Image (cartoon, rainbow, N blue to C red):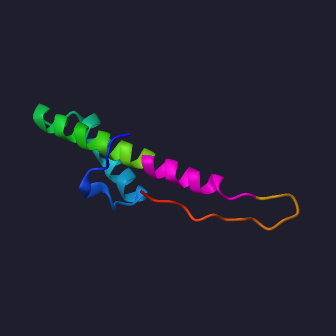
Amino acid sequence: MAKTPDDLAKVSFEDALEALEDIVRKLESGDVPLEDSIALYERGAALKAHCERKLKSAQERIDKIVVAEGAAPRIEPAKFD
């Protein structure tokens, strides 16, 4: 999987998703010059990958919560790379 660009490393999922939605709106408007559209598309691809990594990490954390029948949930600490 691709490495997170340094400027995205600490961006929350919600902030990244909002930025990605903004890029999509700009690109869909058709009012952006070609070179700017390419730069926006590249940024959008990085944001999409970042969001996917965040979701995968969240899913892995959820998967570690094991609920045995009749027992209290056992929570293992998540590992962040």
44 sits to left or right of 79:
left
47 and 56: which is toward the camera: 56
- Residue 27 percent coordinates (x, y): 25, 37
Which picture quadrant has residue 66?
Answer: bottom right
31 sits to left or right of 24:
left
- Residue 60 percent coordinates (x, y): 57, 51
79 and 60: which is toward the camera: 79
Q: Is residue 31 visible in the rendered structure shown here?
A: no
Magenta-colored segment: predominant secondary structure: helix
Which picture quadrant has residue 61?
Answer: bottom right
4 and 42: which is toward the camera: 4
Q: Is residue 2 above or below residue 71?
A: above
**Would residue 20 be counted in the magenta stretch?**
no
**Would residue 58 be counted in the magenta stretch?**
yes
Find the magenta span and give its range.
53-66
81 sits to left or right of 78:
left
Q: Quadrant of the N terminus?
A: top left
